């Protein structure tokens, strides 16, 4: 497969950045609306807020994945570091939020009417699964960004290992030869 020309790649990257920005802005607007009605001391509000935020993870992860793709393709090393660090922080925050969510779920379950217990249990399980999968996805994106960043950095010039004819698996008593780089 041939690589797309630079102008085509640039247009694709610009479009991907726009889509990524739109998704991030949408999630940010939803988060701002949630925080405008914040009642942190209310355990039911915290339970519902985490469930709502967990439902927003899909568009957020897609936006970050698109940005990761663009940064990798266009060698955006600064953006790769931002994605790596931001995803790692998001995974940590989500893991802490998940632990608090579990505690809130345990505290809230006794105050839920009997006829709503099944719906509450379903919502709690859904929030936990989204939190676990979201944490794993953020960690995966952070690792991928780190690998892309490491792949793009200049290599140190060092020794070159030369294997005997036939490759490293060829039968030879001498083994590989190490010589300095040119």
Image (spheres, rainbow, N blue to C red):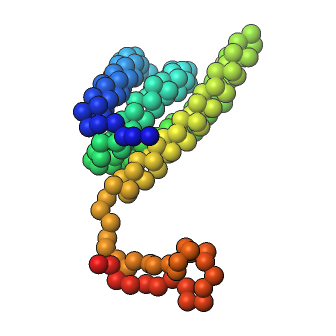
The residue lying furthest to the top in this view is 115
Q: Is residue 113 above or below residue 77?
A: above
Q: Nearer the viewer, residue 45 or 14?
A: 14
Q: Is residue 120 above or below residue 143?
A: above
Q: Nearer the viewer, residue 41 or 179?
A: 179
**Residue 126, image x and y in percent?**
64, 25
**Residue 75, image x and y in percent?**
30, 46
The residue lying furthest to the bottom in this view is 173
**Residue 62, image x and y in percent?**
45, 30
Residue 151 seen anywhere in this rendered image of the structure: yes
Residue 99, by quadrant, is top right
Q: Nearer the viewer, residue 130 or 35?
A: 130
The structure residue drawn at horizontal position 43% and vertical position 35%, both measured from the top left corner, is 65
**Residue 44, image x and y in percent?**
55, 21
The structure residue drawn at horizontal position 63% and vertical position 32%, both measured from the top left corner, is 129
Q: Is residue 19 above or below residue 71?
A: above
Instruction: Name the quadrant of the C terminus.
Output: bottom left
The structure residue drawn at horizontal position 44% and vertical position 40%, both measured from the top left corner, is 1
Relative side of 2 to 169, left or right: left
């Amino acid at each position: 497969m041939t690589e797309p020309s630079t102008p085509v790649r640039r247009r694709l990257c610009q479009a991907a950045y726009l889509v990524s920005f739109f998704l991030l802005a949408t999630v940010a607007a939803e988060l701002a609306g949630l925080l405008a009605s914040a009642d942190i001391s209310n355990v039911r509000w915290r339970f519902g807020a985490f469930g709502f935020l967990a439902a927003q993870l899909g568009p957020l992860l897609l936006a970050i994945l698109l940005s990761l793709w663009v940064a990798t393709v266009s060698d955006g090393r600064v953006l790769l570091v931002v994605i790596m660090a931001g995803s790692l922080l998001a995974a940590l925050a989500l893991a802490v939020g998940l632990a608090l969510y579990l505690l809130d779920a345990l505290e809230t379950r006794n105050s839920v009417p009997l006829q709503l217990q099944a719906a509450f249990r379903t919502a709690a399980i859904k929030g936990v699964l989204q939190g676990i999968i979201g944490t794993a996805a953020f960690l995966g994106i952070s690792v991928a960004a780190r690998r892309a960043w490491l792949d793009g950095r200049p290599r140190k010039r060092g020794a070159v290992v030369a294997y005997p004819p036939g490759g490293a698996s060829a039968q030879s008593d001498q083994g590989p030869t190490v010589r300095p780089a040119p």
